[in-house]
Amino acid sequence: MATEKVFPMTQAGKEKLEQELEFLKTVKRKEVVERIKIARSFGDLSENSEYDSAKEEQAFVEGRITTIENMIRNAKIIAEGELAGDSVSLGSSVTFIELPNGEEETYSIVGSAEADPFEGKISNDSPIAKSLIGKKVGDQVSVQTPGGEMNVRIISIK
């Protein structure tokens, strides 16, 4: 039997997934079922775009529920005490300067389940995180990104 993928995440990330799961099960599922009921009342299902749309949304919601349940079941909580402190690791918040122009950026390195670049949380599987993990303050790092190579210098790790 294949081993299930482990999803490293913070406790806050797990709680966020649990809240999303609860919302999907208690609110969204009911909304979709109601949309299907209404669409059925329109008659002929073979030419009913509202019905097709509602069924597609139902498939998406059920798929997302299954995905979240799997992530929660296989979650590995990264505790504060497990962080290396002096080097970048999963759970670290790292600030670096992009060379040579000196743009400062700060990201928290989290598991893929809770990554949200708009909130400054990048996946440990991302090119930037992979390049930074294990490095220390003052290290100059070359990062291969889809947009090309980027050179950075780490200025702090929390």
Image (spheres, grey):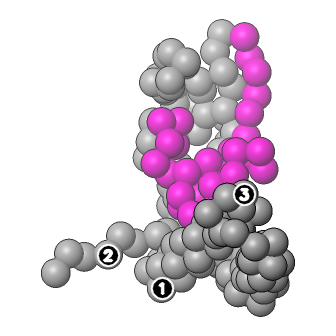
Looking at the image, is 123 positioned above or below residue 30?
A: above
Residue designated by label 1: 73
Residue designated by label 3: 49
Please give the range of residues in magenta.
Answer: 101-129
Q: Are marks 2 and 1 in contact (CB under 8 Å)?
A: yes
The quarter of the picture where residue 61 lies is bottom right
**Residue 10: horizontal and vertical position, in percent?**
62, 72
Q: Residues within 10 Å of mark 2 (few under 14, many from 20)?
A: few
Looking at the image, is 49 positioned above or below residue 41?
A: above
Q: Nearer the viewer, residue 75 or 151?
A: 75
Residue under the point 68% across and 81% down: 21
Looking at the image, is 145 positioned above or below residue 49?
A: above
First in residue order: circle 2 vs circle 1: 2
The quarter of the picture where residue 31 lies is bottom right
Residue designated by label 2: 4
Mark 1: which amino acid?
Answer: Arg
Q: Are marks 3 and 1 in contact (CB under 8 Å)?
A: no
In the visual, does 57 lie left or right of 69? right
Mark 2: which amino acid?
Answer: Glu
Q: CA distance from mark 2 to mark 1?
A: 10 Å
First in residue order: circle 3 vs circle 1: 3
Q: CA distance from mark 3 to mark 2?
A: 38 Å
